[in-house]
Amino acid sequence: MSTTDLPPPETPLEDATAAAGKPQASSPLRSRPVSLSLEPHNVFLFLIGFRLLNGLTLQTFFQPDEYFQALEPAWQLAFGKEGGAWITWEWKSCLRSALHPTLFSLSYQVASAVAGLLKLDTHGSSELLLAAPKILPAVFAAVGDYYTWKFASYIYGVDSVPSATVLLLTIASPWQWFVSTRTFSNCLETTLTVVALYNWPWNWSLPLKETGRTKVKFGVKFDIQPLRTHDDVGQNGENTDEVTRLRRALLCAAVATILRPTNILVWVTLTYLTFIRGWISINPSWTECTVFVRETILCGSIILFFSTILDRIYYDTWVFPPVNFLHVNVVQSLATFYGINDWHYYFSQGYPLLLTTALPFTIMGLYRILGSKHLSIEASAAGRNSLRSLSILSLLVPAAFSNIAHKEVRFIYPLLPALHIITAFPLASFFEPSNLRSSSSRLSKKLLLLLLLIVNLSISYYTTQIHNSGIMHLTHYLRHEFETAYLPSLLPTNMTVGIFMPCHSTPWRSHIQYPPSSTHPGIRAWALTCEPPLNLNATGKSNYLDEADMFYADPSTWLRKNMSYKPPQRKDGTRTTGSAAGVFTPDYRSKLAVNINTATLDLEREERFWATGQGRRPWPDYLVFFAQLEPTLQSALRGSGYLECKRLFNSHWHDDWRRAGDVVVWCLDASRREKPPIPIEQGREAIHEPFFSTEERANRKILAIKD
């Protein structure tokens, strides 16, 4: 869409009609007040409770960034490097602002202090640390919902049907229930964006009243008159509250941009639509122009200053993450390592996922707003202008993001409040009883509305309680195992876990918890990694395989090259007796030295791995993987002593074949097993698995499997 095709700002006639408090005569639709008045404080308290329930009942996994870009660095900030957090390459490369995890680190510190004050046991402290970071995003989500409703009330009128419809849309939205209370930076970005939109000076783009007082600056003739307020366009005298509202908008916009640098596109677009486009046809106000520029510089500088200081403290060096973020993800296109999508992704998949059953009404709203020169909606001129700007924004921003190869729905999540406001009027009009002449029509519309609500509730329940639930239940199971099988021991030892899954398939220290130390046992864990191809040329990037890729390309070879030679060691110190088949072969290097205690050597190797991550991985007490990998591991680890301890339902389907099936947990402790052992003789039936060549098999005599 070119700028010449953009709809013009509201005409003075529309402005005069709205200022007089009269609906346009040609308007077939009206924003009627609802019979029940909604008190703002009651709405806010309800939304707080609603989102707390939402956040505390989430039982499913969505995307790794929820944990590795928020909770893991927050855990390290709260408990130090000895806390065992998994810090990903983005933080090591200074791509992220420390602002977001700092908020959650405070919640961890408060929770830890409360646990100490209440003298909670280990289980109680663990549950409190698990719940603490869920409360903060729930409050953020409630604030976002509240300002979405307030913004709709500003546009459509207080206690109007469309404004109440916006509240219903945001409450019944499956996407909101699924995502809004998670710890993504996009969620906070969405809240900050809608708060800024509510406080944005929409009325400053309207035609000025003629005063005859003008001045020419930079070749443009400016009109000299006081600031206009949100509620009374053209009021005499500068209104301090108007400047305060502008500062709120700019501060929120600045923080959102620091969190997600791509958010600046929203504000560049709105600045053009609100000011520059209107100035082409009308004389701008010199006062409003200078105030806007002054406050933009002031608010931007304040946020930039505090953000820079915070990043300096976190990274221990002077960095500016937004520039690094844009350089790596946009200029170098390193984000494509994590997936490439079609150019139309945001329109063909993004909006349907964001809006679900509301999508037809959103399309209708966009068509009515952008397709008519005179918008037939009972609202103030500023409200109608804001609807036009929001509609243009909802098309331009995803169109711009479409030029970036890597796409995710949550990147356009900040547009959802605007989309709900656009959707509200056609949705309310469609189901408005006064528009239905016959009783059969009213009944059919009621049934349709009920069906839409049932569909939304079903999607919400399935995505937050069922799909990808096994991943989250796994972390609860591992904590429970440590609390019941390791901590009560007379001589407590570390519990070890190995995860054969695509990288970042599970939350880490924020949910596993119990970091080991020199004085207290804990949970040691390792997982497959997926470091991106940093500092490689195009050829190197195209041929690059991360560790998880190499594992799934040939699991047998990976196990042989990267896992310990010796069979797993049980808690009592014993290993599988006899000659184990598969990847367990004698470590011939240990025989080269004389009088070397092999047990000591093994222990040193294991400790070196846990300290540095280098060397062969030790076989853990618990192995975790998706069910699709089970046949391969049954063949590879026959005779190892591993047996199934737990099987957790995860999903009915998955778009990643590597994540198909249940979450399966194998362990070594017979008392923790839920299934009988697989006879070791079954190893002979799977000897065809290509872990070694025929010559290697003959040399190592792995055919001689004995009990």
Image: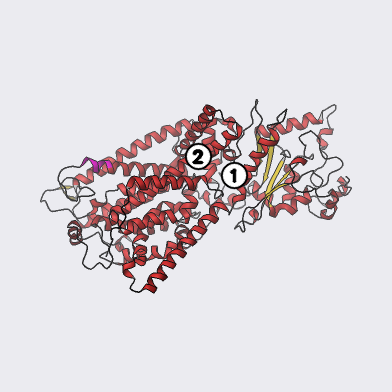
- In percent of the image, x 70 and y 30: which residue is there? 492
Tell me, yes or no, whether the two marked residues, 2 and 1, touch with CB atoms within 8 Å.
no
Q: Which mark is residue 531?
A: 1
Residue 179 place in picture, x, y as percent: 48, 50
Is 479 placed left or right of 333 in the picture?
A: right
Residue under numbered circle 2: 133
Q: Amino acid at mark 2?
A: Pro
Badge 1 crowding class, 10 Å Cα cut-off, few under 14, some 14 to 19, many 20 or more, is some
Q: CA distance from mark 2 to mark 1?
A: 27 Å
Picture quarter containing residue 83?
A: top right
Residue at the top extreme, as displayed: 519
Residue 666 place in picture, x, y as percent: 72, 45
Residue at the left extreme, as displayed: 212
Whether the magenta-drawn stretch holds residue 147 is answered as no
Relative to 70, does residue 175 appear above or below in the rendering?
below
N-term-proximal mark, 2 vs 1:
2
Q: Mark 2 falls on what kind of element?
A: helix
How would you classify the magenta stretch by its main secondary structure? helix
Residue 579 place in picture, x, y as percent: 86, 43
Relative to 342, does residue 335 appear above or below in the rendering?
above
**Magenta-drawn segment:** 238-244
Q: Amino acid at mark 1?
A: Glu
Question: Closer to the camera, 165 or 591?
Answer: 165
- In percent of the image, x 68 and y 39: which residue is there? 481
Whether the magenta-drawn stretch holds residue 239 is answered as yes
Is 12 placed left or right of 296 in the picture?
A: left
